[in-house]
Image (cartoon, grey):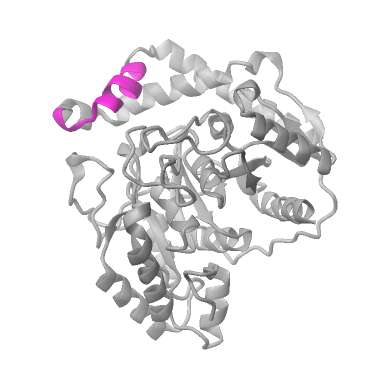
Amino acid sequence: MKSLSATPLSATEAVAAIEAGALTAQELVRNCLDRIAEREPTVKAWAHLDPALAMAQAKAADAAKGGLLRGVPIGVKDIIDTHDMPTGHNSPIFEGKRSFGDAACIALCRDVNAVILGKTVTTEFANRHPGPTANPHNPAHTPGGSSSGSAAAVADGHVPLAFGTQTGGSVIRPAAYCGIMGYKPTFGDFSRVGIKMQCHSLDTLGLMARTLDDIALLRAAVLKLPPVKIDASIATPRVGFCRTPVWDDASDDTKALLERTASKLGAVEVAFAAPFKNILDDHGAIMGWECVRNYADERLRNLDKMSREIMEGPIARGLEVTFEQYVAAQRQASAFKAHVDSLLEQVDVLLCPSAPGEAPKGVEFTGDPRFNSIWTLAGTPCVTLPAGTGSHGLPLGIQLIGLRHADDGLLSIAAWVQARLSS
């Protein structure tokens, strides 16, 4: 068996080793816990961890001798309910609080013998006030947010799999900053039952892993379907290079990376129609209107426990959005989704930046989500792939966008891209 601290096992490798009798879930979980003990003082990825509970789950998985995930440990963003662990939302309002039951995604993973290892650090209510998590590649830099702990834990070998959520850019961006795979599915495909609601029109459960096969494995568990075989040998896809309306805000490193990648993939230029040049304003209006109302109890009954950052930032902006502006934004979002569908009739996949550049210095600012918010609003499936490093030696990523409800195809295209870039 490979040493976890040297070359971490992927979830797919771990399942195969457990099935072959070369590894037990208890050994796998113990290796993960040892890695966490070694690295957690630096990375600070975990909001709640109970090693005894984790080992008890692993023992039960070994005894069960089956299930799609066979004792593979998963990190869970701390806005997702778990009946046997607190769900704190990085807020004093919920400190130490336990939910009555599991979120749907957790129940489905337990059903196939996953080990729910612990709760990973999030920003406050998956918004902007960050926790202490550091980027494992350089602790002086942010891992991104709001799924900060999940991205850092996977990147640093604490777990092979983790759940995040995305309302703006909170799966794709931290995955890119930490140099791992991030996947945001088509909006609505994954159940959000048991996940703290911020914006019902945007919130999306997402997955993080170090390989595309692992993304497919966890996706199968959440959908309660057999895993889809990812095929990198597909026919050459038509790639559209979409700079997006915020292209000018990308770093020079990112622009150069995307242009090199587009050239290598034989991409054609694809652009938004003029009516959608300000589409991010519509994302902001929808997010602002909905988060103010979904946080009604917290901001009205527990105002003294809300951070100044969230009250003076997203809540203040949301209170300025009128219902007429919200309705207009929803209508524009509907038109935008149809427009993106039309672009993906011309090409098979869109290529654009995963983030403006490398992870910013410091942990107080989790980075700019705008390169992702566009696609969250579109409801499209998205994947980020690691694609080298920037001028400061930190990871850069490329983002691939597929047609809604064509997620399986997107994962195979991502595998084709990965193979093409590494050749």
Residue 119 visible to an observer of this rendering: no
Q: Overall secondary structure of the magenta stretch?
A: helix
The one nearer the camera, 100 or 241, is 241
How far from the left and from the top, in percent, is residue 116? Answer: 36, 64
Q: Identify the image quadrant of residue 365.
A: top left
How far from the left and from the top, in percent, is residue 201? Answer: 46, 32
- For image coordinates 38% across by 14% down, the residue present is 321
- For image coordinates 38% across by 11% down, the residue present is 322
- For image coordinates 38% across by 85% down, the residue present is 63
Would you place residue 390 above or below residue 128 in this image? below
Q: Identify the image quadrant of residue 300.
A: top left
In this picture, residue 28 sits left or right of residue 272: left
Residue 417 visible to an observer of this rendering: yes
Image quadrant holding the C terminus, namely bottom right
How far from the left and from the top, in percent, is residue 38? Answer: 36, 65
How many discs mark residues in the rendered view?
0
- For image coordinates 25% across by 62% down, the residue present is 84
Q: Which residues are magenta?
A: 304-318
Q: Which residue is the extreme one toward the bottom?
A: 21
In this picture, residue 393 sits left or right of residue 133: right
How far from the left and from the top, in percent, is residue 31? Answer: 41, 74
Q: Identify the image quadrant of residue 13.
A: bottom right
Magenta highlight on residue 115: no
In this picture, residue 45 sits left or right of residue 177: left
